[in-house]
Amino acid sequence: MSESCNGNCSSCQENCDSRDLRAAMNEHSNVKKVIAVVSGKGGVGKSTLTSMLAVAMNRKGKSVGILDADITGPSIPRAFGVSECRGQDEQGLYPAMSMDGVQVMSINLLLDDETAPVLWRGPILAGAVKQFWTDVIWGDVDYLFVDMPPGTGDVPLTVFQSLPIDGVIIVTSPQDLVSMIVSKAVNMANMMNVPILGFVENYSYLECPDCGRRISVFGESHLDEVAERYQLPVLARLPIDPMLARLVDEGKIEEADVSGVDSVLRAL
């Protein structure tokens, strides 16, 4: 870092790989591990996977929180059936608490109407996510899962730079297009020096309720080829599950069978 550095990186021309842009955690928080769940595109079930991981880890007796970084498309509160934070004082903001004890922080908990659109530009979106780390009192948390927005824009960049990410899980689906999209997510994580734990393929198949045959609704998977190219593991392949979808819609994700993500937990 240059001796003349003023801390403003926006106009800096120095090649300064050693600078630390991480934001300070709220002094009343003690988060041990931060795991980001990312995808290169929307609609692949990233929020559902984030919720399943939180539920599964909570059932193992760990203290768990979810930071919903998808400001314009938040869905975590609905999955857990929570609608408001636990309050606020001079120390900070207290996240919502689910029935089984999973803490949740999302922009939808701060809106009078959860259907109101958030019409903010990129830097303001990124600033809000940063405040979920600096201003929210998480307390003692073993695992904080960050549900990221899709793509490689301002918010993912802010999360990777500002939070101490311990690992990234990349969510995919079986379509041919995924190869290119996944590559973008992998390359961004590598550019930001964030470790990638592996891939989870969602909507991998539909199991026939009568004969048990697995039907590849979205075509044959090409994820193994991508995983081999980047030398990364495929942690799980999750089916299309109508029961899970119903429980998420009803705010009862904590009643779901989440055993399908047990193999993912072993990588955390």
Image (tube, rainbow, N blue to C red):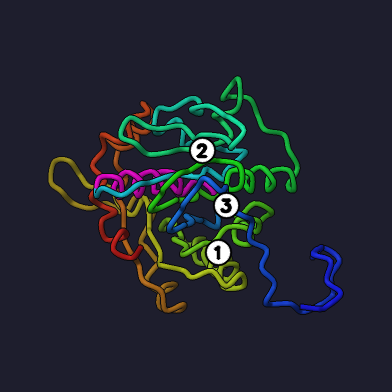
Residue count near mark 2 (Cα–Cα under 10 Å), binned few <14, some 14–19, many ≥20? many
Instruction: Look at the numbered disc 2 and give the secondary structure of its residue.
Output: strand
| Residue 63 is a magenta residue | no
From the viewer's perspective, is residue 197 above or below residue 173?
below
Are the residues at dot 3 and dot 2 in contact (C-beta closer than 8 Å)? no
The residue pinned by badge 2 equals: 105
Q: Mark 2 or 1 closer to N-term?
A: 2
The residue pinned by badge 3 equals: 25
Is 261 placed left or right of 87 in the picture?
left
- The picture quadrant where one finds residue 250 is top left
Which amino acid, by three-letter code, is at mark 3? Met
Name the residue located 50 percent from the left edge and 25 percent from the top edge: 84
From the viewer's perspective, is residue 152 above or below residue 253?
below
Residue that extends furthest to the top in the rendered view of this protein: 112
Name the residue located 58 percent from the left edge and 71 percent from the top edge: 187
Q: Which mark is residue 50?
A: none
The residue pinned by badge 1 equals: 185
| Residue 45 is a magenta residue | yes
Q: Position of residue 63 (x, y in %)?
A: 35, 47
Kindly tell me whether residue 149 is visible in this rendering.
Answer: no
Is 15 placed left or right of 168 in the picture?
right
- The segment highlighted magenta reads 42-59
